[in-house]
Image: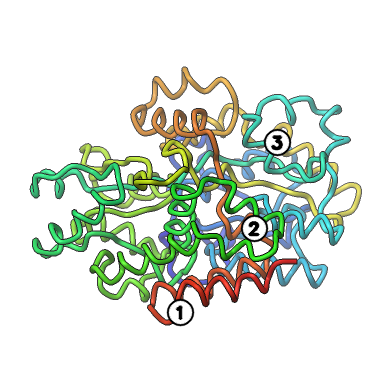
Amino acid sequence: MTITKKRTMTVAGIFLAGAITLTGCGTSGPSTTAAGDGDVSMWGLTNAPMQDIMAASVTEWNEANPEETIGIDFFANDAYKTKVRTAIGAGEGPTFIYGWGGGILKSYVEADEVVDLTPYLEEYPELSERYIPSVANNGVIDGKTYALPNNYTQPVVLFYNKEIFEEQGVEPPTTWDELLELVPVFNDAGIAPLSLGGQSKWPNLMWLAYLVDRIGGPEVFQAVLDNEPDAWSDPAIIQALTMIQDLVDAGGFIDGYSSIAADTNADQALLYTGRAAMMLHGAWTYSSMKSDADGFVQDGKLGYVNFPAVEGGVGDPDNVTGNPSNFWSISTRATEEQRDIAVEYLAKGMLNETYVDALVDAGAVPVVTGMEEKIASSDDEDFLSAMYDLTVNAPSFQLSWDQALPPAAADAMLTNLDLIFLGQQTPEEFATALNGTLE
């Protein structure tokens, strides 16, 4: 994310400052207002490419529907997660609630904070027919649809700097042991083996989620979601935490990683400037690096592979974790008129042809069916095809744990995992603390 201060950004303010240039979005510049000034309100994230695309989509909508306008504000990722929970709890949330599905969506459903969209699916067939089913299912709770996908599929992959790997004469790792063997190679060359935005805490989670999956399979975390007694004490979780600490102790991560914030894209910059050789991160960073790295992506220097297999593990190495998509829900606090405007935008304004083309142009895989032809004609065909294949062929696509869990449990997990990375807690202490969050 290119905006470093954790503050709200209105569309109008962003463009007056000249901070964003729309590319391939079909508009000459937004005329939207701040969220509080529209007929309905929308909050989004200050990340590429979605900030540009959402702003352009809202502008297009407002120009075509001047009596049914949408106002939009943008927030940095970490700031948004805190703000939206507080606002919804106080009954002051936006009309459009941006989310990831999973446990947080379930908590909104249980608190009657989001609208059941199921009745609208018959009125607007496109709301149920255009999405990749495995992605759309993440917006379904107890057989009812409470959220609809709004962008692109985002598996987490191991990115690497091809130029650095070629200089050192090494190949990207396919197993955990191979990853460990690369650590001294890069350290001896004065290059950090791995970049990590540890200050944000949630990037740490990608390591735990993948290792647990590779060691024990998706069933291990499912037991946590099912609130099985002592589920966090599963041997696969203990082993994964131990392996993380081994990697830290071996010098696997760049010095000072706990002070690096993912919201500023500093972790990505370490990869494309050659200060770090690898970075475990979501597919959402591809567009940012393409925009910020001055030819790094376009010149073919960015590599990407699925997370390495773990010898002796029972998890399928084709499994992925990450965000199947982000989602829009509609607040139950909205009036009937506001709900109607919001649903009509979801059906006709979002993920229309202009929106989808903008996603593909930005190097993202839209979560709608029939994308093969558009992907094949894209300048980013290699990456888009790889991410599409990962998503379609994965035996399991596990939602990021901090979104799959209820909010309080997710916060406890991230706090305790930070202690694991800092060496201030043992795996067994982590398990005991998290077992206390099981309902």
Which corner quadrant of the image does residue 349 belong to?
top right
- Classed neighbour count for the residue bearing mark 3: other residues with Cα under 10 Å, few (<14), some (14–19), many (≥20): few
Question: Which amino acid, by three-letter code, is at mark 3?
Answer: Ala
Which residue in the structure is indicated by mark 1? 425
- Please identify the quadrant where the C terminus is shown: bottom right
Farthest top residue?
A: 373
Which residue in the structure is indicated by mark 2? 224
- Classed neighbour count for the residue bearing mark 2: other residues with Cα under 10 Å, few (<14), some (14–19), many (≥20): many
Say left or right for 109 vs 323: right
Question: Which amino acid, by three-letter code, is at mark 1?
Answer: Gln
Question: Which amino acid, by three-letter code, is at mark 2?
Answer: Val
The answer to whether 86 is drawn above or below residue 360 in the figure is below
Q: Position of residue 133 (x, y in %)?
A: 66, 30
Q: Nearer the viewer, mark 3 or mark 1?
A: 1
The alpha-carbon separation of the residues under discs 2 and 3 comes to 47 Å
Q: Who's the residue at 66% across and 53% down the image?
A: 98
Which residue in the structure is indicated by mark 3? 64
Say left or right for 147 vs 318: right
Q: Position of residue 9 (x, y in %)?
A: 56, 64
**Camera-nearest residue between 91 and 237:** 237
